[in-house]
Amino acid sequence: MIEVNGLSKRYGDVFAVNDLTFTVRPGTVTGFLGPNGAGKSTTMRMILGLNRPTSGTATVDGRPFVRRRAGLHHVGALLDAGDVHPGHSAAAHLTALARTNGIGRRRVREVLEEVGLASAARRRVGGFSLGMRQRLGIATALLGNPPVLMFDEPVNGLDPEGVRWVRRLFRNLAAEGRTVLVSSHLMSEMENTAERLVVIGRGELIAEESVAAFAARGTQARTHVTVRTPDADRLATLLTSEGAEVRPDGPEVLTVTGTTADRIGELAFEHRFRLRELASRSASLEEAFMELTADRAEYRAGERR
Ligand SMILES: Nc1ncnc2c1ncn2[C@@H]1O[C@H](COP(=O)(O)OP(=O)(O)OP(=O)(O)O)[C@@H](O)[C@H]1O
């Protein structure tokens, strides 16, 4: 279990992480979502004791991680896939880590097999593609067979087969009862992998809930109904008086939020006006995420804050 409590990190005037509190439980994959610069990497580094918090605490199974010996047995993490000496082979890199953590050589072979790098074990990491480096980073995280695992943007550089493999791997690790935290800036990556979500923006917590609850929140709030009617003005007045939001979208066409297609059908029946089209569309999980984080994205095309 990972517990983050009132965690903050300030760089100069900027809070990279601001009073974050959340819990990551064992047995499920938890997605750690936020736009670029939201503070995901900084939070993960603080959980691992690599960055010192300005205030607050982060514990792994009840204790700050820095206090652990033979760390790879407790927490496995993929943070930066480029963080490997380019002159070393994959096997040498893992063997050195295994030795300092009291892990046998057999385990090195096992994890290389598991991540699909057995045939590249003796090659220099400097010649690896980004996807191969990610696989090596995942092998490193798995090396100590730890109960808690963290992966920062793990699908970067993986091909479609690699993405499917990594999703299956995360689900299997969680099914074994481990705590699995996976960061991403893309909702679509989490939709099929995670059961729970911790969503942050500009260092602050936006949501901590199941993927299903997060999706429902978007759907309830944001079902768009498209109506085509020659009585668009009358209908718009009626809908607005009921509190719905109405936007004209071309001749005779309205896009309505805050009500249902059923209700619009009833109004048409009661007030006797013709409907030529009536269709509702639910916001996708991606849209729910975009809406919730829109005003908290640090970097957007053409502007900075
Ligand atoms: N060492 C540092 N010095 C100054 N500012 C930093 C430092 N590290 C991170 N930041 C700032 O903290 C904020 C959060 O960065 P962080 O890398 O944690 O975000 P992230 O959610 O992981 O983003 P991304 O998806 O782009 O990797 C950003 O504004 C970043 O510029």
Image: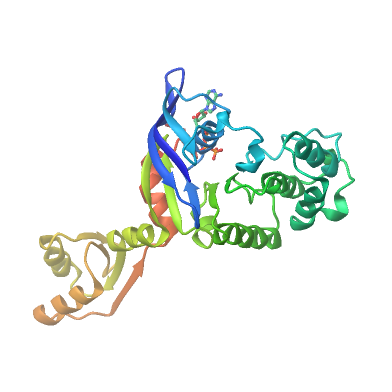
Q: Position of residue 281 (x, y in %)?
A: 35, 69
Quarter of the figure that contains the C terminus: top left
Horizontal arrangement in the rendering, residue 205 relative to residue 154 (left or right): left
Residue 63 visible to the viewer: yes
The relative height of residue 77 versus residue 270 in the rendered view (above or below) is above
**Scheme of image coloration:** rainbow
Question: Which is more toward the observer, 224 or 94?
Answer: 94
**In this picture, residue 79 sits left or right of residue 113:** left
The answer to whether residue 296 is left or right of residue 242 is: right
Residue 127 seen by the camera: no
Residue at position x 13%, y 69% in the image: 234
How many marks overall? 0
The front one of 82 and 45 is 45
Q: Nearer the viewer, residue 173 or 32?
A: 173
Q: Which of 4 and 164 is in front in this view?
A: 4
Residue 124 in the image: state x and y as whole percent: 87, 40
Compared with 162, 135 (above or below) is above
Left or right: residue 132 compared with residue 195: right
Please name the residue shown 23% across and 70% down the image. Answer: 260
Q: Residue at x 43, y 47 (%)?
A: 198
The location of residue 119, given as percent across then percent down, is 87, 55
Residue situated furthest top in the rendering: 12
* Image location of residue 130, percent across then percent down: 74, 45
